[in-house]
Image (cartoon, rainbow, N blue to C red):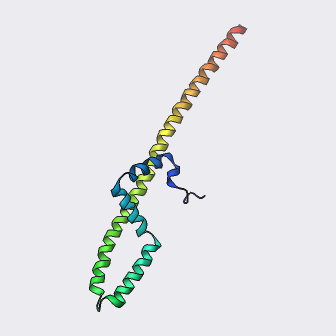
Amino acid sequence: MSTEQRAPSSHPGVAGYLEKRASSAQHRLADAITAFAGSMTFVYVHVVVFAVWMLLGERSPWPTLTLVVSLEAIFLSTFVMIGQNRQAALVQAKADHDFVEQELELKTNTELTRAIHEHTAELHRRLLGGQG
């Protein structure tokens, strides 16, 4: 499975973010709308609706159609920003988790290095002290 296809919940930091997001009805609705607006189904529905509207719905659809398309563009740009904010939050959640894990690993490695140094120094003292 490639990196782009991997489920975002495979990373522990992202899983926590997604659980929090799923608990909010507002976020679930925004995610559903964003997912639909970014799909080919959305494109097909619009092609059909606009074609029917222009051909059968009104004698002169252009003024109303222009208004509807402009308003829809405003909302769609908002959904694009919501998607970008969500992606940025996912990246931040992953980075925060990774930072904490790396700090813990650094602390553990530092403690191990100190312990090895102390044991090595003790061995040197014993070996050198026993020969003199």
Closer to the camera in the image, 88 or 50:
50
Looking at the image, how many numbered discs can be counted on the residues?
A: 0
Side (left or right) of 124 relative to 46: right
Q: Residue furthest top?
A: 132
For residue 111, above or below residue 64: above
Q: Position of residue 46 (x, y in %)?
A: 40, 78
For the point 38% across and 81% down, which residue is it?
Answer: 49
For residue 18, above or below residue 111: below
Q: Quadrant of the N terminus?
A: bottom right
Q: Is residue 121 visible?
A: yes
Side (left or right) of 66 relative to 84: left
Q: Position of residue 60 (x, y in %)?
A: 28, 91
For residue 25, above or below residue 63: above
Q: Is residue 94 visible?
A: no
For the point 39% across and 49% down, which residue is it?
Answer: 20
Q: Position of residue 130 (x, y in %)?
A: 70, 8
For the point 41% across and 55% down, which residue is it?
Answer: 88
Closer to the camera in the image, 110 or 92:
92
Q: Position of residue 112 (x, y in %)?
A: 58, 27
